């Protein structure tokens, strides 16, 4: 599903993983992130030899991903101790992305 929706839509695979596997939310998020990282790395390695990858931008994105991953891990652990908090935060993020896409489509 991550491949179908692209790198930016990998989070949409999470509800599918939850329904198909009945795994906990934190594992579904992790599985989706691993697949998105693998697709992104494969794509970058495919384009890099042709010079189509700006190394500076790639380094910034990678740094942001590592920092965001570490912050997300801490936040996920903190939220997992509260019943359903992670589910609520995830639902809010998905809803906000949906609103953003609707507003962006109008412009």
Image (cartoon, rainbow, N blue to C red):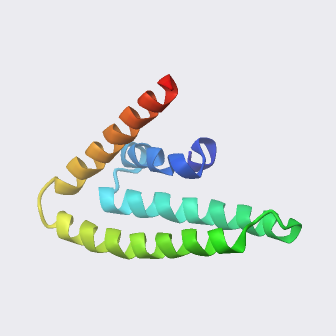
Question: Which residue is most to the front?
Answer: 107
Question: Which residue is most to the top?
Answer: 106
Left or right of residue 18: residue 65: right
Q: Which residue appears at 56% of the width and 59% of the height?
A: 36
Q: Which residue appears at 66% of the width and 67% of the height?
A: 41
Q: Tell me residue 66's x, y (percent).
A: 47, 75
Give above or below for 53 relative to 90: below
Q: Tell me residue 27's x, y (percent).
A: 37, 62
Q: Which residue appears at 47% of the width and 47% of the height?
A: 13
Residue 24: tell me if it is visible: no
In the image, 40 versus 81, the foreground residue is: 40
In the image, 16 versus 39, the foreground residue is: 39
Within the image, what quadrant is residue 73 found in? bottom left
In the image, 88 versus 25, the foreground residue is: 88
Left or right of residue 99: residue 65: right
Number of numbered labels in the structure image: 0
Residue 43: tell me if it is visible: yes
Left or right of residue 25: residue 83: left
Q: Which residue appears at 43% of the width and 28% of the height?
A: 102
Within the image, what quadrant is residue 51 found in? bottom right
Within the image, what quadrant is residue 74 found in? bottom left
Q: Tell me residue 1's x, y (percent).
A: 56, 45
In the image, 51 versus 84, the foreground residue is: 51
Q: Tell me residue 11's x, y (percent).
A: 45, 50
Question: Which residue is most to the right?
Answer: 50
């Amino acid at each position: 599903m991550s491949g179908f929706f692209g790198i930016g839509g990998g989070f949409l695979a999470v509800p599918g993983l939850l329904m198909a596997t009945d795994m906990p939310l934190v594992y579904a998020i992790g599985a989706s992130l691993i697949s998105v990282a693998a697709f992104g790395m494969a794509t970058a390695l495919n384009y890099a030899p042709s010079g189509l990858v700006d190394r500076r931008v790639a380094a910034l994105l990678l740094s942001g991903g590592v920092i965001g991953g570490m912050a997300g891990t801490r936040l996920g652990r903190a939220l997992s101790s509260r019943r359903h908090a992670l589910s609520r935060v995830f639902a809010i993020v998905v809803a906000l992305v949906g609103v953003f896409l609707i507003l962006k489509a109008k412009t």
